[in-house]
Image: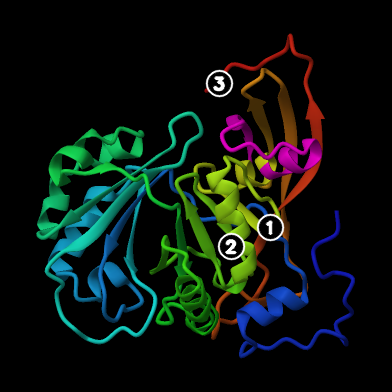
Amino acid sequence: MAAAGSHFGRSQVRLTSVSTCTSASRLLDEPLAGTAATARTWLLIEQPGPWGAKALTSSHLDPTLGRALEAAAQGSGVRIALIRRPGRHADCGTPAERRVYAAHTAPGNVWLHGATVCDPELLLDLDFAALGQGDPRSFDTALDARPHTDEPLALVCTNGKRDRCCALLGRPLAAELASSGVNGAWEVTHLGGHRFSPTVLVLPHGYAYGRAEAHAVKEILQGVREGRVVTEGCRGNSAWERPGQAAELAVRNATGEHAAGALTVVRTDGTAPRWEITVAHVDGRVWRVAVAQGTSLPPRPDSCGSALGSPARMDVVAVRQLDETAVPVAC
């Protein structure tokens, strides 16, 4: 399968290291599938005001606390990010209280819980290993948290200190969503894949989207309310590693299955640059999906200001449904 953009001649595509990463990615029609950040559990901490490139230790959140949280989450499967409401971000110091969310995205155990806290030091009481495995009890106990029953969350990456495209494209999107009545709209510090800005993560199910527009995000959120997944513009489910993300989306597109939670990546065989991914349906059907790691050509910046490079991409080579009697054992 040819690399995205390989049909462009080098004389037709004039990219430099100062090209915006998003304009280059769009021009070359770089595929989105298999590019989402990987995290089975997300921990989101409200922190208004400015954010630095490494927001946990370069914002108004106590950097000592930020470093302790980073250490506690290391290797747990929990990804921590800061969030703030869309709009102007005055340097207003430490908030009296803040919202905190935890979300687990693995199908079969998807949940989103929220709390309001006055002392963020309480976050150090969390059992990060249990959170990463999908157990919310320490979160609920330490923070007096409850299941989130309001609108799904739409987290728009807006941290210009990591990449200017996130601010230039993400902040207007977040503002438009908020002004049009999307109550679950938040800005978030980092979702990865700057060149796909505006990037959005939707919780509780954990599907990420790229090159997002407000009308598309609203359709995605409506899908969440109805228990379905919108695959257009989807980068993948953060519960899976990137080959699994591409494989699950390929099965959805091949079968027309849009029900949230219907598919699970139950097995991954192989190593880069080629994998065989087993995807199972709740009704018992099973598929084997061949995924190959390709190279994006011609070279393009994967982040604004970076040198031209060739980002890895996930190419689905084949999708094959297995006989119902040959169901692999999950591992």
The three-letter code of the residue at mark 3 reads Ala
Residue 219 in the image: above or below residue 61 = above
The three-letter code of the residue at mark 2 reads Val
Q: Position of residue 277 (x, y in %)?
A: 66, 34
Is residue 299 visible in the rendered image? The answer is: no
* Residue on which disc 3 sits: 330
Mark 1–mark 3 Cα distance, whole angstroms, equals 26 Å
Q: Quadrant of residue 216?
A: bottom right
Q: Which residues are magenta?
A: 249-271
* Residue on which disc 2 sits: 217
Residue 309 in the image: above or below residue 271 = below
- Please name whichever residue, 97 or 178, is drawn nearer the observer in this view of the structure: 178
Q: Are marks 1 and 3 in contact (CB under 8 Å)?
A: no
Q: Position of residue 215 (x, y in %)?
A: 63, 67
Q: Earlier in the sequence, mark 1 or mark 3?
A: 1
Mark 3–mark 2 Cα distance, whole angstroms, equals 33 Å
Q: Indicate yes or no whether the magenta region holds residue 133.
A: no
Q: Position of residue 64 (x, y in %)?
A: 13, 66
SS type, badge 3: loop
